[in-house]
Image: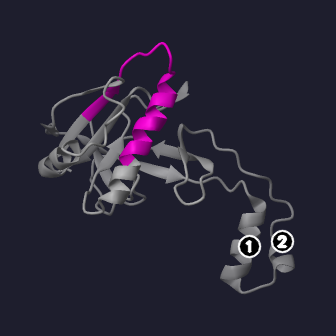
Amino acid sequence: MDYYLDIGLLPDPDFVPSMLMNALFSKLHRTLVENPEMTVAVSFPEYSLTPLGLGSCLRLHGSQQGLNNLQNTSWLSGMRDHVTCKAVQPVPDHTGYAFVQRVQAKSNIERLVRRNAKRKDIDEAEARSNYQAAKPEKLRLPFITLNSQSSGQRFSLFIKQSKPQETAQTGAFNRYGLSQTATIPWF
């Protein structure tokens, strides 16, 4: 992750920034699914918990060749009028490192019951008793709204971006450009 590329959302009277970020992120995800050899990570330089939001800049992290290869695809078709892309640049020296992770709420108790029953090889009634007092968890994190390619349903992809730390952690990035174990350069 030696290079980065900033993609900024342009102000648009017809679309709120979150709607444009949803569309941009959806296009990136689709491209990463179609091109599994691409390793790209994401971060949000304007990420905020108060007020809640991802901001109007999507930062892509990767190798110089990987980011150039991404830009040589047509992944931004339909978005060019709504974004500005800076050139691929090397990451500055002396950066911090941050985790950018997906967080899933424990909001569907029935799904948790089924998973618990399967994992522990118990019947659903016994698993349900483990969740009698459970209340659906509500997350207070910025999110992207996406359409599932497999089911067609809309869902919220909640994103947690950690405070910078001094040491980098290695690991794999998923097709959303997120990782539970790896950090990205933060500057």
The residue that disc 2 covers is 128
Q: Position of residue 88 (x, y in %)?
A: 16, 37
Q: Position of residue 145 (x, y in %)?
A: 55, 41
Residue 9 lies in the magenta stretch: yes
User: Is residue 98 shown left or right of residue 124?
Assistant: left
Q: Secondary structure at mark 1?
A: helix
What type is the residue that disc 2 sits on?
Arg
Q: Is residue 16 visible?
A: yes
Vertically, is 84 above or below 2? Answer: above
What type is the residue that disc 1 sits on?
Arg
Q: Position of residue 137 (x, y in %)?
A: 71, 50
Seen at 66% across and 81% down, the residue is: 119
Looking at this rendering, what residue extends furthest in the top direction? 13
Q: Which quarter of the figure has residue 93?
A: top left
Q: Which mark is residue 147?
A: none
Q: Which mark is residue 114?
A: 1
Which stretch did the figure color magenta?
6-28
